[in-house]
Image: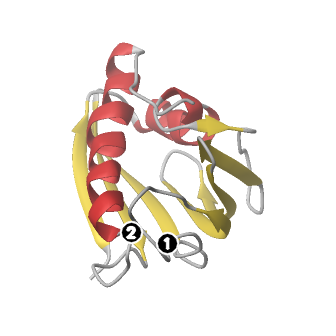
Amino acid sequence: MSYTTSVSIEANSKIIFNAITQSVQEWWGNTNTAVSKLDDEFTTSFDKTFWKFKILEFKPNSKIVWQCIAAKHIHTGFDGIEKEWIGTNVEWNLEEKSHNETILNFSHNGLVPELNCYEICYPAWERFVTQSLKSFVETGKGMPHLS
């Protein structure tokens, strides 16, 4: 089963959607460009690791899907993970509960326990989605991995 998580964020869906499309570097990692439409591409990197994504779905303030189209994932002690994300989809669904509360339903379709990187990627997504992104949206300060 692919990795999924949900988090309640004290903000409307527009603010969260903008954080996911315009400010990835504020809560995840170094990012080369913002995205604003279907088929846009961007790359996020940590140290020597990078992932390149293409936007497969773009529904403003509601849903966005990133497909990993290139990768070089390097992590000491983990072999065979460099390209594991290629072809996987990162899906963000926003469910606005009120003007100041939105449920973010996140899934990384294809990130399954059988992958070599699962044991490091699962807790990393937990941190970046449920803590760093939430903190960035609610307080203006995320906890990205910038190096």
Disc 2 marks which residue? 117
In the rendered structure, find residue 102 and report the number of the disc placed on it.
none
State the image quarter where residue 101 is shown. Answer: top left
Identify which residue, 68 or 15, lies in the foreground: 68
Q: Secondary structure at mark 1?
A: loop
Q: Is residue 96 left or right of residue 145?
A: left
Instruction: Determine whether 23 is above or below 112 in the image.
Output: above
Asked whether the residues under the numbered discs 1 and 2 touch, taking CB atoms below 8 Å apart as contact, a structural biologist would say yes
Q: Is residue 134 above or below residue 4?
A: above
Where residue 140 sits: x, y (%)? 42, 15
Measured from the top left, where is residue 97 in percent x and y? 25, 42
Q: Residue placed at 59% from the left, 41% from the top?
A: 47
**Quarter the N terminus occupies:** bottom left
Question: Which residue is depicted at the point 25% across and 58% down?
Answer: 5
Q: Which residue is mark 1?
A: 81
Image quadrant of residue 56? bottom right
